[in-house]
Amino acid sequence: MAQEDKIIFCTGGGCTAKLGAGVLSHILEKLPRGEPDPNLLVGYDSRDDAAVYRITDEIALVQTVDFFPPMVDDPYTFGQIAAANALSDVYAMGGEVKTALNLVCFPESMDLNVLGEILRGGAEKVAEAGGILAGGHSIADTGVKYGLSVTGLVDPRRLTANDTGKPGDKLILTKALGVGLICTANRVGEAAPGAMDAAVASMTTLNKSAAECSRRYAVHAATDVTGFSFLGHLHEMMGGRLSCRIDASAVPVLPGAWQAADDCLFTAAGQRNRNHTGPFVRFEGVPFAMEEILFDPQTSGGLLLAVAPEDAAPLETELKGVGLPAAIVGEITERQDTEILVSYPEYSKPIF
């Protein structure tokens, strides 16, 4: 694509643009709940990935919405990433994508060909997900923002909420971490060679294959790792009643992320994540760069699955077989004094 067709004003976006988890929780706590509805299986009070509303004993609607400003210069790639990120919430709930609506903010003074490329990238990802792009809404704005409102279907008996894991479950992460750090490094011209290409490849990969593989195993809980970071979403999975142990040396990391963290190319969102989730975490022998990777906001990140122990290794193998860098990264335990214990056994500085 020619330089003039790129979103050259890109100064940071994706899930780094999300409000911090602490601020958001404070606001949501003040909203009126209304009369409880037994068919609302998952609502905003659970801090889950999407809302789920039961229609029949076999069918429930999964509803989610996600949009943000660009984190890459190429509009087509941005459209793909934003769509993949929005679609991911349906997969995290165990559902299948059915319809999507475009959400667009776009300056009237900007070349409409840029908008066309954004929408083309998004439409292709909706089609890849097996969904139908059914319409949308646009407003004139001072900056570019794009995303989707997505509706899916799930069998309520197969619903995977984010906080229904069990002691003994193994934790599997399906994508590598480090997107936020790499995008920040790229923005200031300091990304390692090939790092941005690897990050884009990860962000444009749907979680569809991971979700399809997981349906064949006993997955007790799931979430997608996005702006609140691996540790932030893991904290939500614990639900105030569980604890977990994480082996940081097993966590997949994108090439270039460690170097970006070593070079202190942090994001403000990553520091907000540390401030909010840090009190629930104890690190043992974990290098500071790896801590930053674990707090790094992800855009279109992977699924984090709580899997019955006997199914964890077979599911990990199947996920790797479809080309995903999936790994068993820890396990859930009964409630402990420390909610999340992160260790890095036999640390030696990695080469990535």
Image: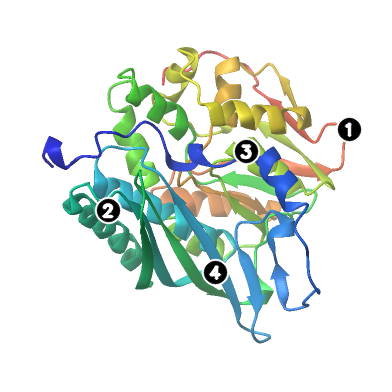
Quick check: marks 2 and 3 in contact, CB under 8 Å?
no
Residue under circle 3? 20
What residue is shown at x 49% (from left), y 55% (from top)?
66
Pointer 3 or 1: first along the chain: 3
Q: Residues within 10 Å of mark 2 (few under 14, many from 20)?
A: many
> Who comes first in sequence, dot 1 or dot 2?
2
Instruction: Answer whether labels 1 and 4 touch (C-beta < 8 Å).
Output: no
Scheme by which the image is coloured: rainbow
Residue 35, position as x, y percentages in the image: 81, 74
Q: Earlier in the sequence, mark 1 or mark 4?
A: 4
Q: Secondary structure at mark 4?
A: loop
Mark whose residue sits in front, 3 or 1: 3
Q: Inspect this view and state whether residue 177 appears.
A: yes
Residue 3: x, y in percent?
14, 35
Task: Residue type at mark 3: give it.
Answer: Gly
Which one is in front, 131 or 213? 131
Q: Earlier in the sequence, mark 2 or mark 3?
A: 3
Left or right: where 67 falls relative to 159:
left
Residue at position x 60%, y 15% in the image: 287
Give me the C-alpha separation between circle 2 and circle 3: 26 Å
Mark 3 secondary-structure assignment = loop
- Classed neighbour count for the residue bearing mark 1: other residues with Cα under 10 Å, few (<14), some (14–19), many (≥20): few
Measure the C-alpha gap from mark 4 to mark 3: 27 Å
Placement of the N terminus among the 4 image quadrants: top left
Can residue 130 be seen here? The reply is: no
The disc placed on residue 95 is 4
- Residue that badge 1 annotates: 337
Q: Residue at x 25, y 39 (%)?
A: 7
